Image (cartoon, grey):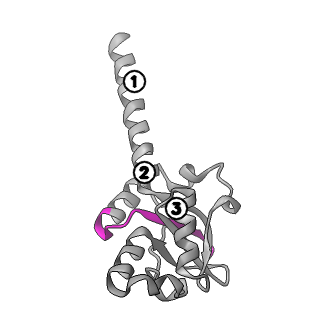
Amino acid sequence: MQIGKLIEGRASSDIISVNVDQPVREAVGLLASKRIGALPVMAGGQVAGIFSERDVIYRLAEEGQSCLDRPLGEVMTSPAITVDRTTSANQALALMTKRRIRHLPVVEGGAMCGFISIGDLVKSRMDEVQHEADAMRDYIAHA
């Protein structure tokens, strides 16, 4: 299955993102209030990086609470690793595993059109496996 199919029906305007100039403190508040693990960080309508729970932990360990007042552009993971609509779910999973990341912006023509997590991809794969198992059971039952 392609990523485009996974994000079908999701409005890009529903993606929660932050700006490179926002302080870390605001992004941490968003992560907590929305119960999410990462945010795309935008600059001029383009994905500039990703800000994740890991970024918070690493910065707090290095700098203490002073990092909370720094702009996201200084602490985010950059450049963002992205995929496009034609990337397969299996390719995206392999990329996430290789790079040890859990979120990917989906980019088309330079603009972000989706944001997927490893959970989205695992759920998709589980649905595929279930569909294949059901088809096999049906085939065996009617053979």
Which residue: 57% across, 59% down? Answer: 33
Q: Is residue 26 above or below residue 2?
A: below
Looking at the image, which residue sits at the far top? 142
Name the residue type under label 3.
Ala
1 or 2: mark nearer the eye: 2
Name the residue type under label 1.
Asp
| Lateral position of residue 142 relative to residue 14, left or right | left
3 or 2: mark nearer the eye: 3
Name the foreground residue: 76 vs 35.
Answer: 35
Could you classify mark 3 by the number of other residues whose Cα lies within 10 Å: few (under 14), some (14-19), or many (20 or more)?
Answer: few
Could you classify mark 2 by the number of other residues whose Cα lies within 10 Å: few (under 14), some (14-19), or many (20 or more)?
Answer: few
Percent coordinates x, y for residue 69 in the rendering = 53, 86
Q: Secondary structure at mark 3?
A: helix
Which of the numbered marks, if any, corresponds to residue 119? 2
Q: Secondary structure at mark 1?
A: helix
Which residue: 43% across, 80% down? Answer: 77
Give the mark nearer the N terminus: 3 vs 2: 3
Q: Residues under labels 1 and 2: Cα distance?
A: 22 Å
Q: Quadrant of residue 60?
A: bottom left
Percent coordinates x, y for residue 15 in the rendering = 63, 62
Which residue: 70% across, 62% down? Answer: 13
The residue pinned by badge 3 equals: 32
| Quadrant the C terminus occupies | top left
As for residue 17 lying within the magenta part, the answer is no
Q: Secondary structure at mark 2?
A: helix
Name the residue type under label 2.
Gly
Q: Is residue 47 visible?
A: yes
Name the foreground residue: 98 vs 20.
Answer: 20
The residue pinned by badge 1 equals: 134
Magenta residues span: 97-109
Percent coordinates x, y for residue 37 in the rendering = 46, 62
Is there a contact, CB below 8 Å, between mark 1 and mark 2? no
